Image (spheres, helix red, strand yellow):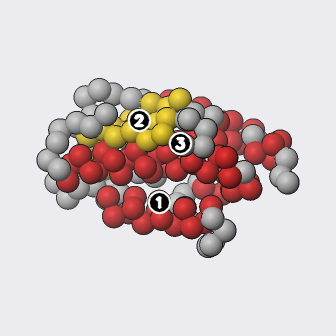
Amino acid sequence: MASVAALYTPEVLMLATGLIRHRWDDALMLKGEARSPSCGSTMKAGIDLDAQGRIVRIGLAAQACAIGQAAGAIMADAAIGRSKDDFARAQGDIERWLAGEGDLPDWPGLAAIAPAREFPGRHGAILLGWRAVLQAFSAFAKGESAGA
């Protein structure tokens, strides 16, 4: 079994503080929220979209472990310019990777949290950001102005 020390590296802890770059803003047009059933961590994502349905601004609010916060920051750092399809594809790739069914997905920065794959209890926290953003995109598809 993998060591917890391998999980909470200085790099992961530094990434977790990166959420400050993506502050929550109630003015964001679309909102979504996700909860990890395995640990209870939560994350809210708010997004603004351009005319082509691509993210132009993102904000997050998290109550999550350092892995969940780091994963959220990694997700948000590369969110600008991405569409709902990009997020759906990435979430599927990450889920398959976490299940041991593929290589590390092509999302900038994910290698920093790769050791968390050996901790199934953290898998839900890793996916929080992608799930919250996809819920926000679903609000757009339904014509709603706000979700969570």
Secondary structure at badge 2 equals: strand
Q: Residue at x 57, y 48 (%)?
A: 124
Foreground mark, 3 or 2, reads 3
- 12 left or right of 2? left
User: Mark 2 Cα within 10 Å, few/some/many (few <14, many 20+)?
Assistant: many
Q: Between residue 12 and residue 93, name the one nearer to us.
A: 93
Which labelled disc corresponds to residue 6? none
Q: Residue at x 47, y 45 (%)?
A: 129
Residue 91 percent location from the top left of the image: 47, 60
Residue 98 percent location from the top left of the image: 62, 61
Check disc 1 and report the residue beneath it.
91
Q: Quadrant of the C terminus?
A: top left
Check disc 3 and report the residue beneath it.
36
Q: Residue at x 54, y 43 (%)?
A: 37
Q: Between residue 83 and residue 124, name the one nearer to us.
A: 124
Q: Please, what is the three-letter code of the amino acid marked with disc 2? A: Lys
Q: Please, what is the three-letter code of the amino acid marked with disc 3? A: Ser
Q: Residue 89 appears in which quarter of the rendering?
A: bottom left
Residue 72 percent location from the top left of the image: 52, 43
Q: Tag 1 or tag 2, which sits nearer the N-term?
A: 2
Q: Please, what is the three-letter code of the amino acid marked with disc 1? A: Gln
Q: Are marks 3 and 2 in contact (CB under 8 Å)?
A: no
How many labels sit on residues?
A: 3
Secondary structure at badge 3 equals: loop
Which labelled disc corresponds to residue 44? 2
Q: CA distance from mark 3 to mark 2?
A: 12 Å
Q: CA distance from mark 3 to mark 1?
A: 14 Å
Q: CA distance from mark 2 to mark 1?
A: 16 Å
Q: Residue at x 17, y 42 (%)?
A: 144
Residue 59 percent location from the top left of the image: 38, 35
Q: Tag 1 or tag 3, which sits nearer the N-term?
A: 3
